[in-house]
Image (cartoon, helix red, strand yellow):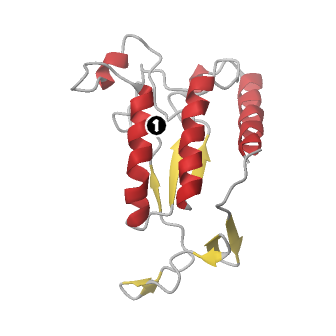
Amino acid sequence: MKQRFTEVSIQGEQFLINGAPTYGGRVWNGHKIEGLLMNSRMVQGIFDDLNPETAGMWAYPDTGRWDADRNTAEFIAAMPEWRAHGLLAFTINLQGGSPQGYSKDQPWHNSAITADGDLRPDYMARLARILDRADELGMVVILGIFYFGQDNRLADEAAILRAVDNTVDWVFDQG
């Protein structure tokens, strides 16, 4: 298990990172923000599209093809800037979110979870890189597992339970 350097906790009604209240002593428009956990929904950091019919929709203009590892590398490269501007936490999701906004139909296949509830190693390797960088920067990661429109890709309730167990085990193994 890796040694981690960032620890989030709650004391009373305040969030603390490494034992110190977030945004210590800060106010915004007369409102105390100390102890709040400002966060942004950045659920596409490990995005990939496993559907060959839709994967081309996300092609980079300079290469003409989609590259999930490049997406993650660019996400990681941006993290220090987010942190420098005061973002202490972000949400990422094993099934992403809709890359087109809130879409009724989601023909793309973006899931770190197989139909049987196992975790896809390529997705989890990308997530590990993000978690490692967040830890280095003192940022908190809020990890989601399922997303509507992709959750139906799991075979049954047993697969859903297996996905939760596998995810929790994986997180604990990461430290």
In this view, the residue in front, 102 or 172, is 172
Residue linked to disc 1: 97
The correct choice, above or below, for 35 with respect to 116 in the image is: below
Total tally of numbered discs in the picture: 1
Image coords of residue 101 (percent x, y) = 35, 38
Task: Report crowding for label 1: few under 14, some 14 to 19, many 20 or more residues within 10 A (C-alpha).
Answer: many
Q: Is residue 140 visible?
A: no
Q: Is residue 48 above or below residue 30?
A: above
Residue appearing at x 40%, y 65% in the figure: 84
On the question of residue 166 being in view, the answer is yes
Tell me where residue 80 sits by quadrant.
bottom left
Q: Which residue sits furthest top? A: 53
Quarter of the image for the N terminus: give it. top right
Q: Amino acid at mark 1?
A: Gly
Residue 169 in percent (x, y) is at 78, 38
Give percent across and percent down for residue 42.
Answer: 44, 47
Secondary structure beneath dot 1 equals loop
